[in-house]
Image: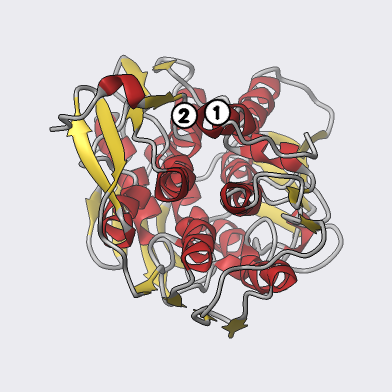
Amino acid sequence: MYTGDMHNVFRANVPSSKSLSNRWLVLQHLSGGSIQLNNLSSADDTQLLQTLLSSLSRPTHEVQTFHCDNAGTVARFLTAVLSATEGRYIVTGSDRMKQRPIAPLVNALNSMGASITYISQHGHFPISIVGKPLQGGRVDIDASQSSQFVSALMLIAPFLPKGLTINIIGTMVSEPYISMTAHVLRQAGIAVHYTTNIIHVPNATPMCGGVRVESDWSSVAYLYNWVLLGGRPLYVAGLSLGSSQGDRVVADIYRCMGVDTTPVDNGIMLQRSAVCASSLAYNFVGCPDLVPALVVACATMGIEGKFEGLDALPYKETNRIKVLALELDKLNIKISYGYNSLYLWPRTGAIAVDKPICLSPHADHRMAMAFSAFLFLFPSADIAISNPLCVAKSFPNYWHELELYSGIHNGNI
């Protein structure tokens, strides 16, 4: 229990989980609105999915086009939903979305009787869908590029007459997100059976009334860097260490870095400790979204970092491995990397900035939030972050909260 001075504690306003929100929105839509959702995420991705599902609720004989911007969860969940919904649809997105993979999900759905074709490049958006009732049964799917393919199938499974038995092939990435989907389905009263690589979701009617979505552990990861570098204790409501969100492991990782996480009433407290790691070595195959925050944390502290299990990072909003190396090189922070690993070289002296530097997040919300840690080291105009509003994808009020916590202001806002 936290016993310090509560007057010095910053109470962070963190959005609710967009990962949980988006899963519940799909279930709410497919169940005809019988599930009441409270505390939905304010993230752009969740607002977009809500808008697109709402437009789908209005029947039309015309071809409907769903533009998913660069929201992978939205595009992939919608692909599964539309495949099982009568109508004619086109699913597309931003230029980056058109580079991100969709073939494993398309192959699985087509093997179930769906009718999905590629409009331009094979294996990528945009796609054309002729939606029709699907029966379910058994399906194989490759989960080596994204767990969202599996979650998309799981979410439509209860509404298929035969349910669905999913056989996962290949090396699974981001498995905690599949476990999160199973948790949501069970919370909705659906008896999911999940072993190592077999998931069975029966045909069933969701049996739950109101659901309150908890705060977002993925967003809190960046707040750990605030406490690590700023020192002021920070409180986040609506989170627990027993959360179904896989990114809750961030609490264990940062404990080794120098930030303790203490359960308090209806939330958690983050506070700086005397621990100072000399290096960090971790396999992030189950929590790849934490990598940007922790690479930057190690860089600011000048410690060695060995990051493995990064198979999913090249397929995110940008290639996060390459962008971390490219942008941190502007600060003479050296990174070596391969397809699924990254090595951060230890630093002997302080980071020196002898001219104004602008770090580009490459339109990636998590990169922008990660780079904000450098503002603690250089609170003047020496360092700025371009395209700062891309954080709205998951944490719309991020810069406002950062300024309230530290007084630091990104010069580009």
Identify the residue at image location x=27%, y=33%: 268
Q: Which mark is residue 374?
A: none
Q: Quick one: quadrant of the N terminus?
A: top left
Q: CA distance from mark 2 to mark 1?
A: 9 Å
Q: Position of residue 184 (x, y in %)?
A: 33, 36
Q: Which mark is residue 14?
A: 2
Q: Quadrant of residue 351?
A: bottom right
Q: Residues within 10 Å of mark 2 (few under 14, many from 20)?
A: many
State which tag comes first along the sequence, 2 or 1.
Answer: 2
Identify the residue at image location x=48%, y=18%: 32
Taking depth in this image into account, of 47 and 229 the one nearest to the observer is 229
Q: How is the image coloured?
A: secondary structure
Give the secondary structure at mark 1. Answer: helix
Identify the residue at image location x=57%, y=25%: 42
Q: Quick one: quadrant of the C terminus?
A: top right
Taking depth in this image into account, of 352 and 28 the one nearest to the observer is 352
In the picture of the structure, the residue carrying the numbered disc 1 is: 401
Tags 2 and 1 touching, CB below 8 Å: yes
Three-letter code for the amino acid on which mark 2 is drawn: Val
Identify the residue at image location x=71%, y=34%: 87
Q: How many marks?
A: 2
Q: Residues within 10 Å of mark 1 (few under 14, many from 20)?
A: some
Q: Quadrant of residue 39?
A: top left
Taking depth in this image into account, of 312 and 256 the one nearest to the observer is 256
When the figure is inspected, residue 308 is found, relative to residue 243, above or below; the finding is: below
In this image, 213 relative to 143: left or right? left
When the figure is inspected, residue 77 is found, relative to residue 121, above or below; the finding is: above
Give the secondary structure at mark 2. Answer: loop
Q: Position of residue 231 (x, y in %)?
A: 39, 43
